[in-house]
Amino acid sequence: MPVDLERALTAFADSLEFPGEATLAERVVAELSRAEPAPDHVVVPFWSRPAGRRVLAVAAAAIVLVGLVLVGSPRARRAVADLLGIGGIAIERSTSSTVGPSPESSPAVASTAPPTFPPGPDPAALAAGRPIGLDEGAAQVGVVTPVPAAIGPPAASYLGTPPSSGKLTLVWPPSSSLPPTAIAGVGALLTVFRAEVDEGLFQKLAGGGTTYERVSVDGAPAAWLSGEPHSFLYLAADGSVVEETLRLAGNTLIWTQGPFTYRLESALGRDEALALAGSVPTG
Amino acid sequence: MASPSPEHLPDSAAEEAALVTRARAGDVEAFGALVGRHQRAALRTAFAVGGSESEAEDVTQEAFVKAFRALSRFDERRPLRPWLMQIVANEARNRRRSRERRQRLAVRAAALGGHEPGSAEDLALGAVSAAELRAALSGLDDRDRTVIALRYFAGLSEAETARALDVPAGTVKSRCSRALERLRAQLEETL
């Protein structure tokens, strides 16, 4: 595939269009005339000039970018590892990474009397963080304790990172209302963290073996994902790229409420998951 | 090869020198005329180095403002464009670094999941598309990207690029051909 790169580059440059090109000189002159000293007299810091402030405002507003990347193909997996700057990362399909009970793991004790939960998932396998009391964990993340009325308090709760602002994971065992999932002892996982979902990227990236459906929870945009397991990428408020592997091979509902993103992983169908999500108190 | 843009014809050199002199004395309007002459090259350089079309305008505006303030340090015996492009490239590079992670995510996402339909990205440039070129450019390091930006996006000659980069002309030649090689490798990886 020999490509005349020099020509392609020049053609690419020529094809670029900048809507503000025609008025650029005007804007520079206006900015320079505004409160401009003669050249080199005063150095006005970038952030204190109008353009600088605008840029900072935009940067502050664009705090979060969420992507969903399917890891079905080796190429996508490599790209994800690349993206995260950790080549060699193993991103496994959760169908093939079913986690059995870990003998020495005693699941965290939740603040409220938990249902019996033997033998319990290994928190490390869930990448959930350290055990923490339910209310304490919620307070750390700054979210209203997210216990769905439909299923009651979880068996265990964990506080982890990323993002640095904390990620609260609640775990329920299978029950009459929660069918078993690919992870032994787990009926549902609810994760809450501070980040926003960019719908555009969902739509752009969903494909392959995963079905993406746009739904809503309490009027807020939500994504319903079913099919192949996937990774979940987002940009935290501190600018770091965070990769979350969705751990259950089943169905995932992701929705936002205010500054928080909620993620429910379970074997529930769409309507049941939506009903459950709708019963999560958000204050 | 890049053709010289219309506002950069040699016969306007004397006119440009006069504008530079006036701008150095604080004439903002004269500087505005200089901006008009170089904005096309500047915007494209800002894009190629910075990797973002939406940011390129802001970067370019900021770079011109900085250039005006720094005019007293400009050697009038030299051509203006390489000096300006140096400032534009620096500004774009700094801006890029400050949001590089976000950028990488978006570009990778585009590479993985396709791109917005109907955008200029769909434009085919011979055997390679704009989207592929954009993604490949983004995979280069600052040094490679900058030399490519100056040569093919700003349309500077090797000698002018050498001035902008403050390196010998021979260095530009080898640096440029290595950058093109790596760009080609990036493209082959993507395709």
Image (cartoon, rainbow, N blue to C red):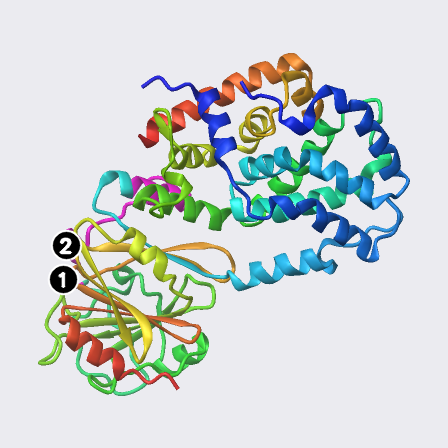
Q: Where is residue A166 shown, x and y percent of the image?
A: 43, 68
Q: Where are the magenta residues, as a range?
A: A77-101
Q: Where is residue A32 shown, x and y percent of the image?
A: 79, 51
The chain letter for the residue carrying disc 1 is A
The answer, for residue B112, to whether it is visible in the render is yes
Report the residue marked by disc 1: A182
Q: Residue A95 carries which label?
A: 2
The chain letter for the residue carrying disc 2 is A
Q: Work out how far the residue at label 1 is from the one at label 2, CA to CA, in angstroms.
A: 7 Å
User: CB atoms at circles 1 and 2 under 8 Å apart?
Assistant: yes
Q: Is residue B84 above or below residue A262?
A: above
Q: Does the magenta stretch include residue A80?
A: yes
Identify residue type, mark 2.
Thr
Q: Are marks 1 and 2 on the same chain?
A: yes
Identify residue type, mark 1.
Ala
Q: How crowded is mark 1: few (under 14 residues within 10 Å), some or many (20 or more)?
A: many
Left or right: where A151 falls relative to A237? left
Q: Is residue A126 above or below residue A262?
A: above
Q: Nearer the viewer, residue B191 or A273?
A: B191
